[in-house]
Amino acid sequence: MPLSTTQTVPVLNIIRRKSPKMTPLQQNVAEYILRQPEKVIKMSITRLAGETGVRSESSIVKFYRILGFSSYHDFKVTLATELAGTSFYHTYEDITSDDGIEDIKRKIFLGAMQTLRENLLAVTEETLLKAVELIENATRIVFLGYASSAAIAYDLYFMFTRLGFNCHFSMDSHINAVTLADPRPGDVIFCVSYSGESKDVVIPVKEAKPTARVIALTGFADSPLGKIADVCITTVSEEMNYRTDAMVSRIVQVAIIETLFIAVGLRKGPPMWDRLKKTRQSLSYLKY
């Protein structure tokens, strides 16, 4: 029976207990994780396979299933929770159960500022320009994102609809799968997935290529999504505890999509700004 990630599961102890009965390759994986678990929770399954010298990702799949996990994501989340203990945040300074509201505010704000600075250097002009060019020349843009990523994808959908693009967004993976089953020349699929491992994003997008072009906003360039993207915008985040639900990485994602929105708008010139003015006026009746 798969382990439940809603409970505290001693992942490292389970690895120590089960590793003597594993194959030599699986023991290599176990030893690597036991030595540096903090690094592992930031790795995609592809990178972990490469770092541990196993033959393929399927070897990692067999490893976490031996431990009782149904997916690599479940394994990483549970390991991250174990490492975090009673703290809730790691990007700048741990938030603990003893912190008051002022401590929490300071740590979150400073952590966000540090992460934004890191991404200012990490996200290259070349990558952003490639994304801008794909968007600018798209005949239709399909935005994909689920769970916490859905908010970013929906924000993108609203932004570029205001700029006059033919856009599609749905939180229903079935609707998106049907939409992408018949890709059109000029389609651009903009995917938001921090892990880059969401099957309901990766599978239909993979099927839509090469007709459609793909932009990925993710935390891992070597993830399944990052590998199939024509343009991969990779964010940097030092978060370790998944209880924060990739909080700081969302702040970085918002900064990136605002950058793309303004850059595309500027390229479109004065007519685009006139359109933005009209759309702003069209919503004025909804406000007092």
Image: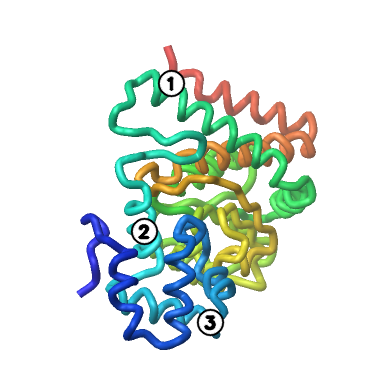
Per the rendering, the mark at residue 79 is: 2
Disc 2 crowd, CA 10 A, few/some/many (<14, 14-19, 20+)? many
Residue 38: x %, y % from top left: 47, 55
Residue 78, horizontal then vertical, whole percent: 33, 58
Vertical order, 138 against 74 (above or below): above
Which of the two residues, 67 or 274, is positioned nearer the viewer here? 67
Amino acid type of the residue tagged 3 in the rendering:
Val
State the SS at label 1.
helix
Q: Quadrant of residue 94?
A: top left
Residue at image coords 45%, 60%: 37
> Of helix, strand and loop, which one carries label 2?
helix
Amino acid on which the number 2 mark rests in the picture = Leu
Q: Which mark is residue 202?
A: none
Q: Residue 81 in the image: x percent, y percent?
A: 34, 52
Secondary element at image label 3: loop
Using the numbered discs, state the Cα–Cα distance from disc 1 to disc 2 in whole angstroms. Answer: 47 Å
Type of the residue with mark 1? Leu
Side (left or right) of 10 relative to 269:
left
**Mark 3 or mark 1, which is nearer the start of the sequence?**
3
| Spot occupied by residue 154 in the image (x, y as percentages of width and height) | 48, 44
Q: Mark 1 Cα within 10 Å, few/some/many (few <14, many 20+)?
A: few
Name the residue beneath numbered marker 1.
286
Q: Residue at x 58, y 28 (%)?
A: 279
Is 132 rendered above or below residue 188? above
Give the residue pinned by disc 3. 54
Q: Nearer the viewer, residue 103 or 150?
A: 103
Residue 137 seen in the figure: no
Q: CA distance from mark 1 to mark 3?
A: 58 Å
Looking at the rendered image, the disc whose residue lies closer to the viewer, 1 or 2, is 2
